Image (cartoon, rainbow, N blue to C red):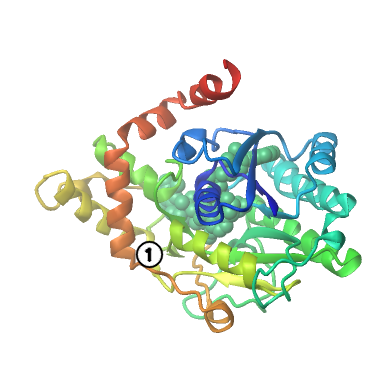
Amino acid sequence: MKILITGGAGFIGSHVVRLFVNKYPNYTIHNLDKLTYAGNLANLTDIEKKPNYKFVKGDIVDASFINSLFEKEKYNAVIHLAAESHVDRSITNPLEFVMTNVIGTVNLLNAYKKSGVYSQTAPLSLGEGRGGEAALFYHVSTDEVYGALGETGMFTEETSYDPHSPYSASKASSDHFVRAYYDTYKLPVVISNCSNNYGPNHFPEKLIPLCIHNIKNNKPLPIYGKGENVRDWLFVKDHAVAIDTIFHQAKLGSTYNIGGHNEWTNIDVIRLLCKVMDKKLNRPDGTNEKLITFVKDRAGHDLRYAIDATKLKNDLGWVPSVTFEQGLDQTVDWYLQNSEWLDNVTSGNYAKYYEEQYVKR
Ligand code: NAD
Ligand code: DAU
């Protein structure tokens, strides 16, 4: 079984690659990544020499490269995570999000369809849900496609799409293409829509790692608007386990929501983080909270996300394994123990790792 994981050098992708490489030594895992500012091979040093792992540098927007890769490698399955993922960047440069998230996804769908592998794959015992079919195009998406909630209610798999940011519009569009390839060409697909992740290896432009970095360096913690927006936080390793579960057991053509039942206003998340880091950095209680600074709100800022993950729990038995407090504790420890990773990422030096490991040899 040869699986292509796209975006495997990024935050969530690196946790998915690690899980699959370690848990399934009989699978061959190829990690295709362009290594944009968000891709970092230093996320994968512990598994890069494993015999069932290979890194492939490439751009999913480059159709001829993608077609030749699929022609050559005949991937049985794809787990597609590569994307431009930051909402604020999508507000300043929407076209880049159209290119990677929409065109890149359609290029992968076309190449997988053309390779024809999915209709020829011999059944492997991969779980009951698909009758053991190994062929799959698994598209990893976001809860932001559903738009914003008011003070009550939750997103279910039946909620209509209503994206508001260029990022979520591009992800919604890619979801529609994946669904269209199932309906039109019978391509074997599944989609999952997950809430906000946090954990090790998160690029420090996103709220939690940005604030960990700033607290460490005594810098202001920028909170958009009044900090009243609500997000539903899930530990990244729990997301990777959910992806493994869905990959092996979901019915073809299905969609699963993934979430932590863990809603927090932004200001409460940052207050909790400040408390945790007061202790860990031996600072008097209340020191870090003084760094909180309210700044101009994000344009079109979605008020609230909340995922109803009942279907995933009832159908496939997945539930998160850690509480937010446990996950946040582990996350802060990871950042404090990996100062070099954080320094390299914030200084831009991390690209050197690729040069040293893959180019100069
Ligand atoms: P990330 O930005 O950390 O990583 C994205 C990866 O994709 C990087 O390694 C980058 O180099 C690679 N990439 C970008 N453009 C590429 C291209 N044109 N060709 C090949 N590789 C390219 O993102 P993430 O937070 O790990 O998110 C991964 C996926 O999960 C995305 O599809 C995102 O929409 C989705 N998602 C993220 C979250 C979250 O909270 N982070 C939640 C739900 C869903
Ligand atoms: O819901 C899933 C999505 O979660 C993923 O699809 C996206 O890829 C991921 O980036 C994330 O999107 P958000 O916009 O919710 O994440 P971000 O960390 O950028 O922001 C979280 C909340 O914090 C949001 O309400 C905006 C706010 N925020 C963010 C930053 C970067 C601040 O108040 N200050 C900040 O500096």
Residue occupying the point 68% across, 59% down: 139
Residue occupying the point 61% across, 44% down: 7
Residue occupying the point 49% across, 41% down: 47
- Pick out the residue farthest to the top: 360
Q: Is residue 124 above or below residue 100?
A: below
Quadrant hosting residue 347: top left
Along the line of sight, the residue nearer the viewer: 99 or 340: 340
Quadrant hosting residue 125: bottom right
Q: Is residue 301 visible?
A: no
Viewport quadrant of the C terminus: top right
Residue labelled with disc 1:
265
Q: Crowding near pointer 1: few (<14 within 10 Å), some, many (20+)?
A: some
Along the line of sight, the residue nearer the viewer: 271 or 79: 79
Q: Is residue 38 visible?
A: yes
Q: Is residue 338 above or below residue 160?
A: above
Quadrant hosting residue 254: bottom right
Along the line of sight, the residue nearer the viewer: 118 or 8: 118
Q: Point out residue 59 in the picture as x, y percentages from the top left corner.
A: 72, 35
Q: Point out residue 8 in the picture as x, y percentages from the top left corner.
A: 58, 44
Q: Point out residue 48 in the picture as x, y percentages from the top left corner.
A: 52, 37
Residue occupying the point 32% across, 39% down: 213
- Pick out the residue farthest to the bottom: 314
Q: Point out residue 89 in the picture as x, y percentages from the top left corner.
A: 58, 41
Instruction: Report the side of 194 relative to 128 (left or right).
Output: left
Instruction: Report the side of 223 relative to 152 (left or right).
Output: left
Disc 1 residue type (three-letter): Thr
Q: Element at badge 1?
A: strand
